[in-house]
Amino acid sequence: MGYTIAEKIFAAHAGGKPVRAGDIVVASVDFAMVHDGRAPNALRMIAGLGAKNLPFASKTAFVLDHYSPPPNIEAANTHRAMRAFADHHGAVLYDVGDGICHQVMPEGGHLTCGDLIVGTDTHSVTYGAFNALGMGVEGTDLAAVMLTGKLWFRVPETIRVELKGALQPGVWAKDITLSMLGRFGAEGVNYRAIEYAGPAVSAMEIDDRMTLANHAAELGAKAALLEADAKTIAWLEAHHARAPQPVKADADANYVELIEIDTTALAPQVACQHKIDDVVGVAEAKGQKINFALIGTCTNGRLDDIRQAAAILKGQRIAKGVRMIVTPASRQVYLAAAREGLLEALTRAGASVEAAGCGTCVNITGHLITGDGEVVISSANRNFKGRLGNDKSEIWIGSAATVAASALTGTITDPRETVGGN
């Protein structure tokens, strides 16, 4: 019997002997990431251990993205400590405005096909878009990695998801992930890996593949993995990553479940207020009034997302009474969007464009505070009650195209019904 992608990557990083789902392994890590929301735990643990020499620090990125810019003295002092630590130990530093951890990690060339990557955020599963095994861990785990370059893991079982057919114009990877959440429920595939494959995946550009992998965190997945192809290799080469070591599942690999989804029939989806797995077709939510629109976050703040929004809003004006914020996922995305004229189109339409970061997604920066009874349509990954600072407001989740179309009309709208939305 053959092996899954996750089993093969773990085997290669745990001594080379074959491993199976359920095995406990101590594996060597290729690169690690800690963001400012979890850095205090890591720094306290390292200080408590009295560690002076951190041989893996040079392969660890410190990313200042959640408290970006810092909203209070405590956050500012966390940033100060992270900068000092990175400078002293030789860690890679991404400062305020450089971007969201899951965007700057691949952009910075820190990962490649076949790698084992850990980060202090559940959405570290994003790296699976590049045929790497990316997983979220805690700050205390990162301390162990910086000391030893290793960590223990339980090898996850794998679900294989074949995406058949072709996405129709106006339908994106976000809609696939939302439909998966509607099918399995939040945490429905806890501690399992997902392998996404099929013609719909092959047709996706890298930005959409990152969305596909990223949203697996809401499903509870330990990892989400895509096979590498020419698009993957070209993207990694353009970002100066190390030589890729692509990993492909065996034809007779053992999966706990095999699922086929016909993407041709898929319509735009939205997650209803307060529950990321309360998912309906956008037609069922049509006419729901909105007050705020947000495009950004580690899930859908990439260049293709901003292109989707600009295609709908260029030459138009968002509906009266609607406020809109666009937060690019990184400085590189911001500059590329500026060069293409996308930011100008969105600004002229009435949107406000913020510096790269993820503080808006969880309302850490206080830049998106809703009033009582107000409704937000967002391209973020979560819509928990009170996530934007007011438990008396509602958050709906959709693709960047759905968010832009809704901002244009003032109600939740199918992007295929707008000019430029398909």
Image (cartoon, rainbow, N blue to C red):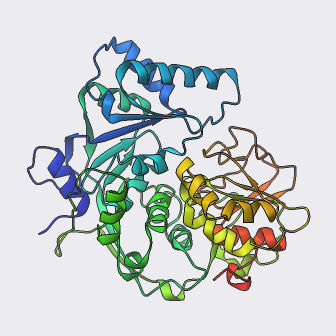
Number of numbered markers: 0
Quarter of the figure with the N terminus: bottom left
Image coords of residue 65 (percent x, y):
56, 39
Vertical side of 90 occupied by 409: above or below:
below
Image coords of residue 53 (percent x, y):
28, 17
- Report the front residue among 227 and 144: 227
Quarter of the figure with the C terminus: bottom right
Q: Residue at x 76, y 43 (%)?
A: 367
- Report the front residue among 56 and 4: 56
Vertical side of 71 occupied by 77: above or below:
above
- Report the front residue among 233 and 119: 233
Farthest residue in the front direction? 339
- Residue 278 visible, this angle: no
Image coords of residue 250 (percent x, y):
17, 70
- Tell me which corner region of the image, top left, top right, bottom left or bottom right, holds residue 97: top right
Q: Is residue 347 left or right of residue 271?
A: right
Farthest residue in the left direction? 17
Q: Residue at x 82, y 76 (%)?
A: 287
Vertical side of 12 occupied by 73: above or below:
above
Q: Residue at x 43, y 25 (%)?
A: 42
Q: Residue at x 42, y 80 (%)?
A: 200
- Residue 151 visible, this angle: yes
Q: Is residue 246 left or right of residue 140?
A: left
Farthest residue in the right direction? 320
- Tell me which corner region of the image, top left, top right, bottom left or bottom right, holds residue 4: bottom left
- Tell me which corner region of the image, top left, top right, bottom left or bottom right, holds residue 148: top left
